[in-house]
Amino acid sequence: MDTIKFANGKQLPLEMHKVRIVQKLGLPPVERRLEAVNEAGNNTFLLTNRDIFLDMLTDSGVNAMSDNQLAAMMVADDSYAGSATFTRLEDKLREIFGTQFFLPAHQGRACEHILALTFIKPGNVIPMNFHFTTAKAHFTRMGGVVEELVVDEGRKPVSDFPFKGNFDLDKLRALIKKEGAGNIPFIRIESGTNLIGGQPLSLENMLAVSKIARENGIITVIDASLWQDNLFFIKKREEACRNMTTREITRAMADAMDIIYFSARKLGAARGGGMCMRSKELCERMKELVPMFEGFLTYGGMSVREMEAMTVGLEETMDEDVISQGPQFIEYMCNELDRQGVPVILPAGGLGCHLDALRFLPHVPQTQYPAGALGAALFIAGGIRGMERGTISEQREPDGSERLAEMELLRLALPRRVFTLSQVEYAIDRIVWLFRNREIVGGLKFVEEPSVLRFFFGRLAPVDDWQEKLARRFRADFGESL
Ligand SMILES: *Cc1c(COP(=O)(O)O)cnc(C)c1O
């Protein structure tokens, strides 16, 4: 759990595993990187893997599996109904969360789809600490309105507050009073909070939200996709939980919630998802949608191999050595960048390192998408693929006006146990270089803009020739010897 001490005083994260399978990487020259980013419409989602050196787009479905996970995949039972693989997964979820019922789904957003169809009516308000793109898209599609109630600290890029994902409980009480419990189908608790930098909630805050919800007869729904990191932070930062085991903390969280849903592309380090609940009635309300949209009730659109890997992955999530790896590498990356003056979200959260584009590129107006521009620039500078989490990731208002994001972040995900420390050092080096040359970087404009989830397929172009200038500066500084 704690970082290992080095005699030379260095504070380095240490891998508590060895690498046994590798994938070769290539680093194309800067000319190709410039070309590739333009072929991709300056949208890192549209880059192809052969052009990418370090893929820090996401932690979704790309975490390194353990030997035990791979071994379990070989014993999967592929019966369409009544598969032993499903029973093993269901038993593991019962053991960890103490929930009797499990509905499988092919990934996290599929759970959000089912939740939205089951519970949300036009005009309903759904309080949450912070929205997530797919959750918001599903909820608003059904006519729901999302209300974000994260504590003010959560919106500050730099803070020493340990739980920036916490709910502001006063705001939650006030909203329930204003809307009336009848207009609130459920409260959605996201642990940890993806879009503000993978920031955790405390167990204390989750319990308080649950208490308020129960007093008002409102259902609590926790998005536990990033629970692995949140669990680590509770264990490490929450005084009252110091002496609790990871299992005890997990159980305390689960006992306070009515529905637990998750993307197993993150939690469980496989590919899939599902929803757990104690109440048969809640399960019955959602059950029929699983075979309609996902697959039969014993696989829900998942491959049985992935389900076996997930069962083992969930067990490994209870191991402190396993779950500390991600946050320790992220903390190292964030602190090194901070030390060299690069604006990052602090304290370091889970999921990845988040560059604060508003402070990195203060000269790029928000209407020219600074986080998107920073993503394109970093790809040119280092063949590193990040993900824009700013205005491009928002949806336009119903009247077509731009909704400017509160934060403009470039997320550099560190999929769990995938990158080595020297790769992280390379990323730090290229980011610092880019920061020293930040005045060259300009904005972007849309050339193709889909109306829904535009960050996935939208295409943009630089507002002028800043990208050629950046590539020229790179060539001048690093020469041709790539
Ligand atoms: C990734 C993620 C989701 C969506 O999960 P998918 O499996 O990608 O559909 C939902 N919520 C959070 C917090 C996530 O990080």
Image: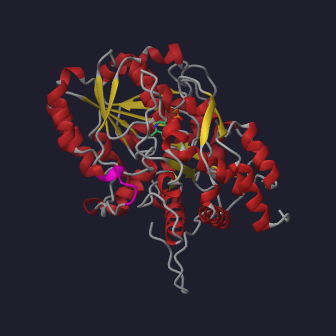
Where residue 27 sits: x, y (%)? 79, 55
Residue at 52 percent of width and 57 percent of height: 360
Residue at 24 percent of width and 45 percent of height: 168
Where residue 407 sits: x, y (%)? 43, 46
Q: In the rendered structure, does residue 156 fall within the stretch colored magenta?
A: yes
Where residue 385 sits: x, y (%)? 65, 49
466 with respect to 360 (left or right): right
**Camera-side residue: 303 or 31?**
31
Q: In the rendered structure, does residue 338 fall within the stretch colored magenta?
A: no
Q: What colouring method underlies this structural image?
A: secondary structure
Residue at 17 percent of width and 24 percent of height: 180
Q: Residue furthest right?
A: 480
**Camera-side residue: 263 or 98?**
263
Q: Locate the N terminus and report the quarter of the image it occupies.
A: bottom left
Q: Residue 62's quadrant in the figure?
A: top right
- Report if residue 325 is visible in the image: yes
- Report if residue 383 is visible in the image: no
**Camera-side residue: 398 or 348?**
398
Range of residues picked out in magenta: 153-158
Where residue 426 sits: x, y (%)? 67, 65
355 with respect to 461 (left or right): left
Using the image, determine if residue 203 lies above or below residue 399. Answer: below
Q: Residue furthest bottom?
A: 8
Q: Locate the C terminus and report the quarter of the image it occupies.
A: bottom right
Residue at 41 percent of width and 57 percent of height: 232
**Camera-side residue: 217 or 145?**
145
Using the image, determine if residue 321 lies above or below residue 462. Answer: below
47 with respect to 226 (left or right): right
